[in-house]
Amino acid sequence: MYYELTDHFIVRAGVEQTWAFFSDARNLPRITPPWLKFTVDTPGDIRLGQDSLIEYTIRWLGVGLKWKTRIIDWSPPRQFIDIQLRGPYALWHHQHVFEPSDAGVICRDRVIYKLPVAPVAPLVHALIVKKQLTEIFRFRRKVIAKELGWVRAVQEDVWVEKL
């Protein structure tokens, strides 16, 4: 079963400043809730771009999980897409879109994901994953708002639905 998570909001910053914030891998731990203990494992300075690989570790329910993503679309300053190559999901496809507006920049996140272990995935999603992903993206929204200047939500809250 596939799921879609979306989040849309407007920040006060311009598109170049917004792009610079999102395309800096050093900001990943900042926009991830502390309870996930997110660490970037890729050595050295990470320059994001087409086909960049990022390796990191999160702790989920006390278990360290290695995660590796690749940037499969890099279209500055409007969009980039990362896809999980290794990690906790059977599929994780995350599209980030930045659209200039009179009020600032509309930031759109769209994640298509699928959990592994199909027979129990719907139950695990309903009991744990949906709530945690919503909390993660709410936290992310708050940090981004603080860094780039909050204007307003386009979408009242993070939304998750079955596809």
Image (cartoon, grey):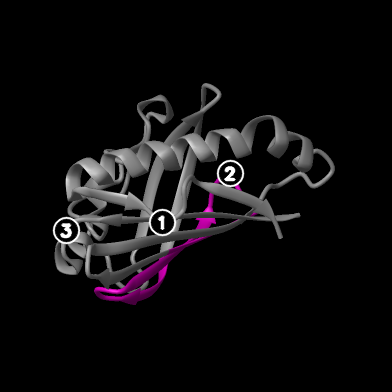
Q: Work out whether residue 109 can be spotted.
A: yes
Q: Residue furthest bottom?
A: 75
Residue 142 belongs to the span the image colors magenta: no
Give the side of residue 94 with respect to residue 52, left or right: right
Q: Secondary structure at mark 3?
A: loop
Mark 2 vs mark 3, foreground winner is 3
Tell me if residue 138 comes above or below residue 34 in the rendering: below
Q: Disc count in the image?
A: 3
Decide which of tag 2 and tag 3 comes sooner along the chain: 3
The x and y percentages for residue 102 are 22, 69
> Residue 88 bears which disc, if any?
2
| Pick the front one: 108 or 71 | 108
Which residue is drawn at the image coordinates 36% and 42% (left, top)?
140
Q: Secondary structure at mark 1?
A: loop
Q: Work out whether residue 40 can be spotted.
A: no
The x and y percentages for residue 158 are 50, 46
Tell me if residue 35 comes above or below residue 150 in the rendering: above
The residue where tag 1 is placed is 154
Asked if marks 1 and 3 touch (Cβ < 8 Å), the reply is: no
* Three-letter amino acid code at the position of disc 1: Val
* Three-letter amino acid code at the position of disc 2: Pro
Compute the Cα span from label 2 to label 1: 29 Å
* Three-letter amino acid code at the position of disc 3: Ala
The x and y percentages for residue 161 are 66, 52
Q: Residues within 10 Å of mark 3 (few under 14, many from 20)?
A: many
Which residue is drawn at the image coordinates 35% and 44% (left, top)?
141
Decide which of tag 1 and tag 3 comes sooner along the chain: 3
Quarter occupied by the N terminus: bottom right
Give the magenta range.
71-95
The residue where tag 3 is placed is 13
Q: Residues within 10 Å of mark 1 (few under 14, many from 20)?
A: few
